[in-house]
Image (cartoon, rainbow, N blue to C red):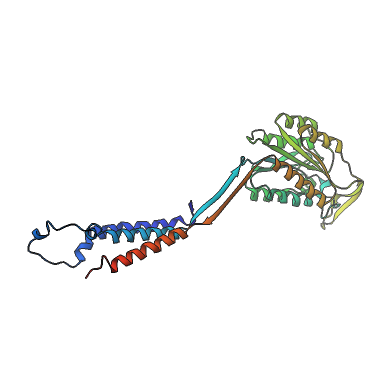
């Protein structure tokens, strides 16, 4: 049993002065009859009324304690559990090369990828999730964390402007992105470790090849789900931004390498997906969400409900008994 407002238990400290008053000072304020000698009462028979002379005081204390417990709002847990509650460690690896600003998926590929990824994160409250970004090089935007609020704020920094502004090198280093994610999952104690790799292009730079990074992931038991994002054929790719903010685009052939992405997924026990629209991307993440949750085999339920009523009824009964005894059996003249 838990209590929603345990600070109310501090009221029990008021019982200390009440005890002191009752046993030390109460008798001095009660009416007395003077007798020349108490010898007459020495052999008087003891009755239940005299034996229970302190019963009203005890009932006062019990009713006060019960009222304090009602104020503290006791809550009972209704809980059942099957299996083991075990989260999954997931590194989301996102391509932020300039081609991800292509508007073939509204409003553009990078925005659609971020929006759908955030929905996926909201459905995984028990998991450690991190974020790795890569263009011509890879870096960690957010390490593995269960603080999904911080993780979601980190997604705001995932923009193609980093490559446009020359902060990271040009190109698409898929192998570096995988290797960076693997390094964060290396020390993970979770039984299930996953990388979700989303890109719209082919590996064309980086010191580590995609297949070499795949071998690293495979040796550590890490599954990699690969997602190829974008429409097929010629696309309008942003190549420059004018001083007035207008983006200059040029129609080029979209360079992709689905064969390598399929091999990466196959080697690690993951799945390859191709998404050409926002709706298809949502289906991809929904499928990954379902696959990974099925590996947990967790079935639990936990519900809190208010349990103050028995204490309230008990307090009422004790107060009624106390009142009846005072006007009948313990009535004083």
Residue 112, x across and y down, in percent: 79, 51
Please determine whether, in this image, residue 37 is positioned above or below residue 239.
below
Left or right side of 154 for 109: right
Q: Nearer the viewer, residue 131 or 46?
A: 46
Q: Residue at x 76, y 33 (%)?
A: 268
Q: Residue at x 72, y 36 (%)?
A: 180
Q: Quadrant of the C terminus?
A: bottom left
Residue 142 visible in the current orientation:
no
Count of numbered circles on the image: 0
Residue 76, x across and y down, in percent: 51, 53
Please determine whether, in this image, residue 176 is positioned above or below residue 23.
above
Left or right side of 7 for 273: right
Q: Nearer the viewer, residue 88 or 34?
A: 34
Left or right side of 40 for 216: right
Tell me where residue 202 sits by quadrant: top right
> Residue at the left extreme?
36
Residue 265, x across and y down, in percent: 79, 36
Residue 8 visible in the current orientation:
yes
Residue 46, x across and y down, in percent: 19, 57
Please determine whether, in this image, residue 183 is positioned above or below residue 116.
above
Tell me where residue 97 sits by quadrant: top right
Tell me where residue 206 sits by quadrant: top right
């Amino acid at each position: 049993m838990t209590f929603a407002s345990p600070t109310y238990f501090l009221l029990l400290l008021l019982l200390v002065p009440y005890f002191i008053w009752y046993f030390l000072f109460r008798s001095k304020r009660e009416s007395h009859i003077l007798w020349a000698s108490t010898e007459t009462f020495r052999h008087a028979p003891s009755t239940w009324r005299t034996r229970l002379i302190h019963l009203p005081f005890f009932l006062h204390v019990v009713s006060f304690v019960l009222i304090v417990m009602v104020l503290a709002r006791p809550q009972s847990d209704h809980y059942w559990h099957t299996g083991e509650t075990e989260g999954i460690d997931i590194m989301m690896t996102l391509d932020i090369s300039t081609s991800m600003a292509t508007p073939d998926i509204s409003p553009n590929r990078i925005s659609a990828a971020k929006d759908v990824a955030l929905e996926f994160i909201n459905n995984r409250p028990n998991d450690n999730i991190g974020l790795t970004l890569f263009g011509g090089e890879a870096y960690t935007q957010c390490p593995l964390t269960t603080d999904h609020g911080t993780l979601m704020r980190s997604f705001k920094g995932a923009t193609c402007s980093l490559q446009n502004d020359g902060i990271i090198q040009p190109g698409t280093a898929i192998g570096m992105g995988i290797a960076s994610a693997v390094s964060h999952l290396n020390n993970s104690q979770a039984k299930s470790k996953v990388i979700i790799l989303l890109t719209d292009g082919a590996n064309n730079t980086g010191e580590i090849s995609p297949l070499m990074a795949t071998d690293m992931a495979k040796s550590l038991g890490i599954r990699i789900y690969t997602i190829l994002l974008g429409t097929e054929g010629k696309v309008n790719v942003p190549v420059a931004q004018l001083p007035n903010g207008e983006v200059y685009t040029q129609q080029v052939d979209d360079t992709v390498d689905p064969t390598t992405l399929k091999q990466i997924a196959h080697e690690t026990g993951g799945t390859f997906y191709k998404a050409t629209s926002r709706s298809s991307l949502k289906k991809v993440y929904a499928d990954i969400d379902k696959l990974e949750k099925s590996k947990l085999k967790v079935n639990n339920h936990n519900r809190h409900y208010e349990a103050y009523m028995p204490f309230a009824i008990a307090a009422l009964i004790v107060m009624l008994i106390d009142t009846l005894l005072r006007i009948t059996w313990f009535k004083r003249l």
